[in-house]
Image: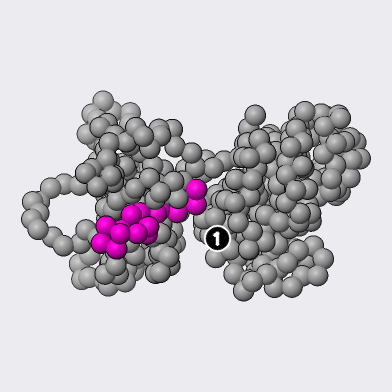
Amino acid sequence: MDNKQMIPCLYLESGRAVTGFGQRNLFGDGDVESLAGMYSDNGADQLLVFDFSSDDAEHEKAIARIKAICEASEIPVMAAGNINRMEDVKKLIYAGCAKVVLNFSKQSNVDLLEDMSKRFGREKMYVCVSSPEEFTDNKELIENYAGGILALDAVQDSVAAASSMQVILHTEENHESELLDLLKHSAVCGLSGAFVSAADTDLVHFKDACKKEGIPVDICESAIGWSEFKLNSDGLIPVVVQDYKTDEVLMVAYMNEEAFQSTLHTGKMTYWSRSRQKLWLKGATSGHFQYVKSLTLDCDNDTILAKVAQTGAACHTGNRTCFFQPLIKKEYDDTNPLRVFQDVYDVIMDRKLHPKDGSYTNYLFDKGIDKILKKVGEECTEIVIAAKNPDKDEIKYEISDFLYHVMVLMAEKGVTWEEITRELARR
């Protein structure tokens, strides 16, 4: 059985988070990016965003906010609300949404499903139903072209009686015991709504309760038990900590069994402080938490490699990493593709911000977007010509020229490599 998903819901109105479908008061401080990050870091599996915009102009602004939410979120984002045409679906997917939810109480959305599914993929298209009839009247269409169902009311029994499709249940139910009973239903694959969206809900704790009830959920569980680790003379294991995005080494610390189990339970890196002789939740004082992305044991079972999402600085000095004091350095070519791309991009951005006489890059910026686009087109054509020739070096040179000019275009339009790689990873 697949793991049941915990899917908090952000209700978006006028660019701010509000409390829900009824009385729409501000939710917290209304900052949707910080809320998306909070949900990502505290045990949520996906994030649902409902757009409450009332007209096209507000909807365009909402899509920009949803793009910001997708960038801030470490978990997949589903978008629902005020979808009226194919262009709305396309914009939401291009904004970074993993799924778009069509409202089947609107015939216009029913009419969109087949075409949108064929264009963007069935797995990206979900349907929202609020009555059994909205499912049963469109059963064949939904089964053929939808990746799943979001139910705004308790219609899981009706769906289960007619189909094997899974339901994400959006409910205002707040009682933990009732929610556990709902999650035991075979048709329910996920939970959204009031309980999982509340800022004070401990989703890690709730997942523990699910596990005890035999409900499969995604929690951190080690494939290798602590007893199999090779510890040092103090009964500790060293942990090398890396940024999960950049692979930058941030710090080295130590764990005892309690720290290891706490890390698994909370999803936040917890160590044993040798100087203070006590458990140390990284960030408890500074707010610079480290959220676990992966833990890997080395070949001798005596060192853990942790990849984390780092909040703020890892080092107590305020540096991003503890490794900032040079000892020796020999010149070498760093051929790591992303680092090379980023380094070249950084030089291009520096030229844009601090022009240099005689710089070809500044010449392109001075001439403007039309000149940059002309060069991108020319270099693209050169690649096509080079590819028809047998010399591998020629195409290598032309692709390098093309990539440089594309990076000038990226800098001109304010597009970063992180945005590009995030989009490629999402695809």
- Is disc 1 surrounded by few (<14), some (14 to 19) or many (20+) residues within 10 Å? some
Picture layout, residue 408 above or below residue 180: below
Q: How is the image coloured?
A: one colour
Describe residue 386's horizontal placement relative to residue 147 as left or right.
left
Q: Is 267 colored magenta in this rendering? A: yes
Helix, strand or loop at mark 1: helix
Instruction: Please state the extent of the stretch shown in magenta in the rendering.
Output: 265-280
Q: Could you tell me how many numbered marks the image carries?
A: 1
Which residue is depicted at the point 27% across and 40% down?
231
| Residue at (84% x, 48% y) in the render | 153
Left/right placement of residue 121 relative to residue 365 reads right
Q: Considering only vertical position in the picture, is 331 above or below 384? A: below
Residue at horizontal 23 percent and vertical 29 percent from the top: 391
The answer to which of 18 and 287 lies nearer the viewer is 287
Instruction: Quarter of the image for the N terminus: give it.
Output: top right
Q: In the drawing, does residue 31 fall left or right of residue 137?
A: left
Q: Observer-nearest residue: 38 or 130?
A: 38
Residue 406 position within the rendered picture, expressed as x and y whole percent measured from the top left: 37, 52
Where is residue 279, by image quadrant? bottom left
Query: Looking at the picture, how far across and down is residue 315, in whole percent?
Result: 29, 64
The answer to whether residue 308 of the structure is visible from this angle is: no
Residue 218 is situated, as x and y percent measured from the top left of the image, at 57, 41
**Residue on which the image places disc 1:** 38
Q: Is residue 82 on the magenta stretch?
A: no
Measured along the vertical axis of the image, is residue 337 above or below residue 8?
Answer: above
Q: Residue at x 22, y 34 (%)?
A: 393
The one of 392 and 384 positioned closer to us in this rendering: 392
Q: Amino acid at mark 1?
A: Met
Could you say where residue 260 lies in the image, as x and y percent from the top left? Answer: 40, 46
Q: Is residue 393 visible?
A: yes
Taking depth in this image into account, of 281 and 305 the one nearest to the observer is 281
